[in-house]
Image (cartoon, rainbow, N blue to C red):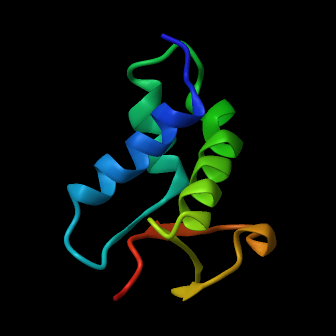
Amino acid sequence: MSVTGRSLEDAILDLLDRRAPGASVCPSDVARAVHRRADEGWRELMEPVRRAAARLAAGGQVEITRRGTPVDPAEAHGPIRIRRPAH
């Protein structure tokens, strides 16, 4: 199975749906979950996961945080987390 941007977006949303409200996921959680179903190694999926998260953030479905604070995906360097937006 090859990994597409859409499958990564779906994996992010699926993992968030399985977590408690307000909980977040690490991009590596998503990469590892997808890696179990794909040929790629999970580390190679880290940047594609971050790009998928940025697309979801642009659509308002998730927010990207650094140290618990929402950040602009374009400015999100280093360790990040992904969570549903607080409404």
Q: Is residue 32 above or below residue 4?
A: below
Q: How many marks?
A: 0
Residue lying at 48% horizontally and 10% vertically, measured from the top left: 1
Residue lying at 30% horizontally and 47% vertically, measured from the top left: 14
Name the quarter where the C terminus is drawn.
bottom left
Residue lying at 49% horizontally and 59% vertically, measured from the top left: 26
Image coords of residue 65 (percent x, y): 57, 78
Q: Is residue 1 above or below residue 51?
A: above
* Residue situated in front as seen by the camera: 85 or 45: 85
Q: Is residue 41 above or below residue 33?
A: above
* Residue situated in front as seen by the camera: 35 or 51: 51
Q: Is residue 6 above or below residue 79?
A: above
Image coords of residue 11 (percent x, y): 39, 41
* Residue situated in front as seen by the camera: 57 or 18: 57
**In-image side of 37 versus 60 (left or right):** left
Image coords of residue 38 (percent x, y): 47, 17
* Residue situated in front as seen by the camera: 68 or 55: 55
**In-image side of 82 versus 79 (left or right):** left
Image coords of residue 64 (percent x, y): 57, 72
